[in-house]
């Protein structure tokens, strides 16, 4: 036999004759289980938490920018209101009223309401100067009549929106 084989055989016999104390097996097993549980439990949870935070950080601002205002359909932007001495707050009030209307009116009623309200708003913008003062004389006779018709047609919608009309 070669010296390598003799040495290997001798080491194997010595290793087989050695006995470890039973509590050493227990400590090694416990240490390994603790390590495995810690690694298994913590890492994926951290990844999920970080992924959730990243998703929220991306989605919340993009949802705010993506949300369209109903008032934009009527005025185009808040700048139109500001040109007639309006404010961001008044624009938000109009938006709130339109959102309430959307919730309280049926789909067809809301479409009709939006069309009539848009026409009325355009006439109001036409007769209002940059200081916010109404000048009805800026409207032609036909426009004044149309404005009165729009106000009367919109009255039942406003009653329903405000809860004073019949459902």
Image (cartoon, grey):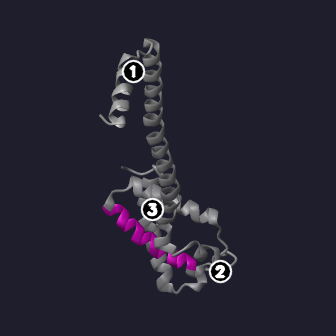
Closer mark to the observer between disc 1 and disc 2? 1
Q: Is residue 33 above or below residue 92?
A: above
Percent x, y for residue 40? 42, 36
154 to 18, vertically: above or below: below
| Numbered range of the magenta stretch | 108-125
Of 15 and 80, nearer the camera is: 15
The residues bearing labels 1 and 3 have C-alpha atoms spaced at a distance of 102 Å
Q: Residue furthest left?
A: 1
Which residue is under mark 1? 14
Residue under circle 2?
129
Outermost residue on the top side: it is 22
Mark sitting earlier along the chain (1/2): 1
**Magenta residue check for 89:** no
**SS of the residue at dot 1?**
helix
Q: Position of residue 16 (x, y in %)?
A: 35, 20
The answer to which of marks 1 and 3 sits earlier in the sequence is: 1
At numbered mark 2, what does the secondary structure look like: helix, strand or loop? loop
Residue count near mark 3 (Cα–Cα under 10 Å), binned few <14, some 14–19, many ≥20: few
The answer to whether 139 is drawn above or below residue 29 in the figure is below
Q: Position of residue 129 (x, y in %)?
A: 65, 80
Frontmost of labels 2 and 3 is: 2
Residue on which disc 3 sits: 155
Label 1 neighbour load within 10 Å: few <14, some 14-19, many 20+: few
């Amino acid at each position: 036999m070669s010296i390598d084989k003799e040495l290997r055989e001798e080491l194997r016999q010595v290793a087989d004759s050695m006995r470890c104390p039973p509590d050493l097996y227990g400590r090694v097993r416990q240490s390994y289980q603790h390590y495995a549980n810690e690694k298994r439990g913590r890492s994926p949870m951290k990844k999920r938490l970080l992924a959730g935070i990243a998703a929220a950080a991306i989605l919340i601002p993009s949802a705010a920018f993506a949300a369209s205002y109903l008032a934009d359909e009527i005025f185009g932007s808040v700048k139109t209101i500001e040109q007639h001495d309006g404010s961001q707050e008044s624009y938000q009030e109009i938006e709130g009223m339109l959102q309430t209307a959307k919730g309280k009116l049926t789909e067809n009623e809301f479409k009709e309401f939006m069309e009539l309200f848009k026409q009325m708003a355009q006439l109001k913008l036409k007769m209002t100067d940059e200081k916010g003062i109404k000048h009805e004389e800026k409207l032609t006779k036909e426009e004044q009549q149309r404005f009165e018709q729009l106000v009367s047609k919109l009255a039942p919608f406003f009653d329903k929106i405000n809860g004073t009309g019949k459902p």
